[in-house]
Image (cartoon, rainbow, N blue to C red):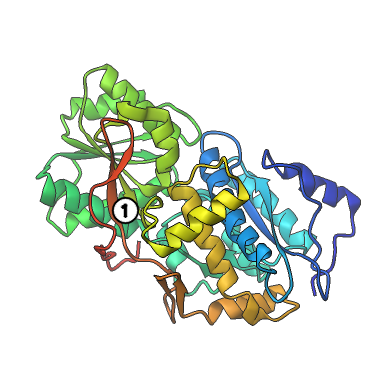
Amino acid sequence: MPKPLVLAARLLTLCALVSGLGTAPVAAQQAPGGGDLAFAQVAPLAGPAAALGTGMNLGIRAAFEEANRAGGVLGRKLRLEAFDDGYEPETSAERTRAVIAGNAHLALIGAVGTPTSQATQPLAEAAGLPFIGPFTGAAFLRDPKLRNVFNLRPSYGAEAEAWVQHLVETRASRRSAFLYQDDSFGRAGLAALEAALAKRGLQLTARGAYVRNTLAVKTALLGLRRAGVEAVVLVGAYKPVAEFARVAHRIGYRPEMVNISFVGTDALLAELGAEGAGVVISQVVPYPFDTDIPVVARYQAALAALDPAANGGFVSFEGYLTGRLALAALAAAGPNPTRSSYLTALQDLRDVDLDGLQLQFGPGDNQGLDQVFLTEISPAGTIAELTPAATPVPAPGTGG
């Protein structure tokens, strides 16, 4: 079994990293024969991407507490401990090293972002630590050679196919532009979009970029307007994307706007409201308000049990599904799981049935879901389905 923390200073450091999610928990110890089973989330809990980290956290905790109310897993209760990385790769790596050194957590779960995952996944892999449900569709995390990564969501390649089908085949747009966060996340989205366009003999008319964790989008916006584009695909976090939309409308520029799922639908809607009418967002999990879907009804009940005041949404629903994915393999790891036994159990997953929602894994396939659908902000400032979730969108051959 993993050893408990032995340095009081490290324990205090880990606890101090927990941000704004209630009372800071005492660092978990994987005690043989009945101690809590702790998972670590290293993600943005403050700053421009905070709603993504806290939303994933909320959903994972809803899944874990649902299991705890039913007696836990083989009599063991689950706990999630969250550490703020500010959506910065260097900080994310630092927090992850502390988690690994503490030797008190079974797995990393619910990471947020491509650049942060690039910094932390190799650390987790070297430590034999499972890396479950990262909130990114980056291609490198879908490499079948990565034996510790277990993705829930479809790839950015699949999302790009949905964007291009919508813009080119439905809206007949021929002059498209791309606004992206100037880092590995934005470049992953750019590569996916260019590949989807190239399949149709098309290319981007223009592109613009902004710096991560800033709202500095105006220069790029003005360049796209000068290029006379009809549609803009946006690959960024919700605050700079909202700033782009607000400034564009203020200056009378109204191209069609299509967003990647990573933007965080709930947070973008909160930023823009009715001002975002017509803005399209691709989604990688089912519509989280349709309680006719059994897993959605169960998610809504679990969320209400955890926090009656919490509002559901796409991000926390993805967190809930990620928590359920983590639970799906836990019993097979035995009553006293180690990182090694749990990793083996995750690697053995094939078809996982989450109340009718099927996750499919297998040799060379570490991604559970494959469907993408589109939503749109309505004139009333609500989110509505634009294409049905039941229609699968195949990923390009690159895997996203």
Crowd tier of the residue under label 1, counting other residues whose Cα lies within 10 Å: few below 14, some 14–19, many 20 or above: some
Residue beneath the point at 70% across and 81% down: 334
Q: Residue furthest top?
A: 251
Residue beneath the point at 40% across and 42% down: 265
Q: Nearer the viewer, residue 230 or 358?
A: 358
User: In the rendering, at what x and y percent does residue 92 appear?
Assistant: 62, 48
Q: What residue is disc 1 on?
A: 191
Q: Answer with the quarter of the image where residue 258 lies.
A: top left
**Residue type marked 1:** Ala
Residue beneath the point at 80% across and 75% down: 1
Horizontally, is 247 left or right of 368 in the view?
left
Considering only vertical position in the picture, is 37 above or below 172? below
User: In the rendering, at what x and y percent does residue 97 appear?
Assistant: 71, 56
Residue beneath the point at 63% across and 51% down: 42
Decide if residue 72 is in sight here: yes
Horizontally, is 397 left or right of 309 in the view?
left
Decide if residue 135 is in sight here: no
Considering only vertical position in the picture, is 330 above or below 133? below
Considering only vertical position in the picture, is 295 above or below 25? below
Q: Residue furthest left?
A: 172
Quadrant of the rendering where the C terminus is positioned:
bottom left
Q: Answer with the quarter of the image where residue 227 lies.
A: top left
Total numbered circles? 1
User: In the rendering, at what x and y percent does residue 312 appear?
Assistant: 48, 46
State the SS at label 1.
helix
